[in-house]
Image (tube, grey):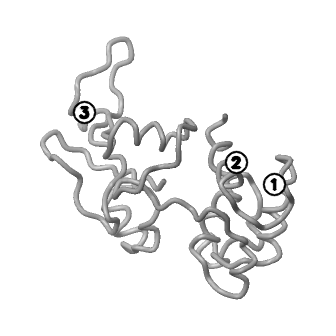
Amino acid sequence: MIYTGKNVWKYECGNTDRYKDYALWQVYYSGTATAPPRMPWPTWTMWQWSGGDSQQHAPKVPGVGVVDVNRWHGTLEELAVFANDGTAPPPPSSNTWPAPPAQVDLNTFRGSYSEYVARVQGLLLSYRYGPDGLVDKVTGLPDGRMGDKTAEALMEFKRKRQMAPDCVVDWATWWALTYDLLGA
């Protein structure tokens, strides 16, 4: 998920649509708007519409005070799935990112760019693998190219979780890459 506001995305990130397949948690404080402004995503997933200080558009929480307030763009069931509570993979809708293929051998992407490889690299980076061989040296972003360093990182990640130490990303691998991040 990418957490950003329209102006930061436009002026600091070049308003790119390169990450439009990731979920968007958009920041746009407003006490009257019914949706945040359009960005280069098909839709927003979460919208932080109220914050602290002068941007407080919602009542204070008793015993806590001023808090950020967010709106989920979907059903309660979709939120539960998105939060990785294990009930089911997310249903196809405009509110969720595309589900990964059932099984992908990342070696099939050697020698070419793949957004799927970039997504896996980004998750591996969150586990402190790399950045050598996983990111572009200029942008610092996952480079989306399947090479030896990405293969080594993925195999080591899987080995530590008693999974086959290969470059195949199936639902079990995808689940481990995303679910562990939540501290489960």
Residue 143 screen position, x and y as percent: 64, 76
Of pointers 3 and 2, the one earlier in the residue sequence:
3
Of pointers 3 and 1, the one earlier in the residue sequence:
3
Going 27% across and 49% down the picture, which residue do you hit? 28
Going 82% across and 46% down the picture, which residue do you hit? 161
Residue 39 screen position, x and y as percent: 30, 65
- Give the class, few, some or many, for how many residues have Cα within 10 Å of label 3's Cα (few <14, many ≥20): some
Secondary structure under badge 2? Answer: helix
**Which circle, 3 or 1, is nearer the viewer?**
1
In the image as oriented, which residue stretches furthest toward the top?
63
**Which circle, 3 or 2, is nearer the viewer?**
2
Disc 3 to disc 2, how far (Cα)? 37 Å
Residue 5, placed above or below residue 18: above
Disc 3 to disc 1, how far (Cα)? 44 Å
Disc 2 to disc 1: CB gap under 8 Å: yes
- Left or right side of 62 for 146: right
Mark 2 = which residue?
176
Tell me which amino acid carries mark 2.
Ala
Tell me which amino acid carries mark 1.
Lys
Residue 128 screen position, x and y as percent: 75, 54
Residue 65 screen position, x and y as percent: 34, 19
Disc 2 to disc 1, how far (Cα)? 9 Å
Mark 3 = which residue?
56
Of pointers 2 and 1, the one earlier in the residue sequence:
1
Secondary structure under badge 3? Answer: loop
Disc 3 to disc 1: CB gap under 8 Å: no
Mark 1 = which residue?
158
Q: In which quarter of the image is the C terminus?
A: top right
Front-lying residue, 173 or 39: 173
Going 36% across and 46% down the picture, which residue do you hit? 46
